[in-house]
Amino acid sequence: MEELSYAQAKAKLQVILDQLEKGNVEIDELSTKIEEATRLYHLCQSKLQQAEQQVENALKGLDEDNQAEK
């Protein structure tokens, strides 16, 4: 199964949350929807942490480059 992008996961999560808030989920589907929402939430959280780490590494690299040029 192909991993979703952050935007795709967030959109799917939002659809599930909207369904839950509006009560548009049958009781038989509730557990499955909550499990999927949890999985999507963790995927989004992981992608945000990865992006944050990449930004920190890039900034650290720029700072090291600036220090080396001085």
Image (tube, grey):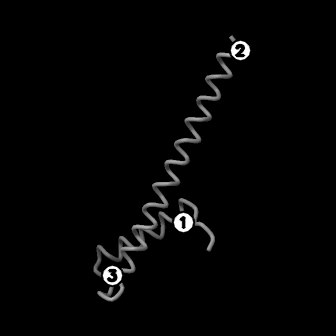
Which residue, given by chain and number where applicable, does mark 2 sit on?
A: 69
The amino acid type of the residue labelled 1 equals: Gln
Depth-wise, is mark 1 or mark 2 nearer the camera?
A: 2
Q: Quadrant of the C terminus?
A: top right
How far apart in space, not on screen, are marks 3 and 1 (Cα)?
21 Å
Q: Earlier in the sequence, mark 2 or mark 3?
A: 3
The amino acid type of the residue labelled 3 equals: Leu
Dot 3, crowdedness within 10 Å: few (<14), some or many (≥20)? some
The amino acid type of the residue labelled 2 equals: Glu
Q: Residue at x 60, y 66 (%)?
A: 3
Which residue, given by chain and number where applicable, does mark 1 sit on?
A: 8
Under tag 2, what secondary structure? helix
How far apart in space, not on screen, are marks 1 and 2 (Cα)?
41 Å
Q: In this rendering, is residue 28 above or below 17? A: below
Under tag 1, what secondary structure? helix
Residue 67 in percent (x, y) is at 65, 16
Q: Earlier in the sequence, mark 1 or mark 2?
A: 1
Left or right of 56? Residue 45 is: left
Which residue, given by chain and number where applicable, does mark 3 sit on?
A: 30
Residue 58 in percent (x, y) is at 62, 34
Q: Earlier in the sequence, mark 3 or mark 1?
A: 1
Left or right of 69? Residue 37 is: left
Q: In this rendering, is residue 18 above or below 42? A: below
Q: Residue at x 45, y 55 (%)?
A: 45
Q: In this rendering, is residue 48 above or below 17? A: above
Q: Residue at x 51, y 65 (%)?
A: 9
Say whether marks 2 and 3 touch (CB < 8 Å).
no
Q: From the viewer's side, name the closer residue of 12 and 57.
A: 57
Q: From the viewer's side, name the closer residue of 22 and 46.
A: 46
Question: Which residue lies most toward the top here?
Answer: 70
Dot 2, crowdedness within 10 Å: few (<14), some or many (≥20)? few
Residue 47 in percent (x, y) is at 53, 54
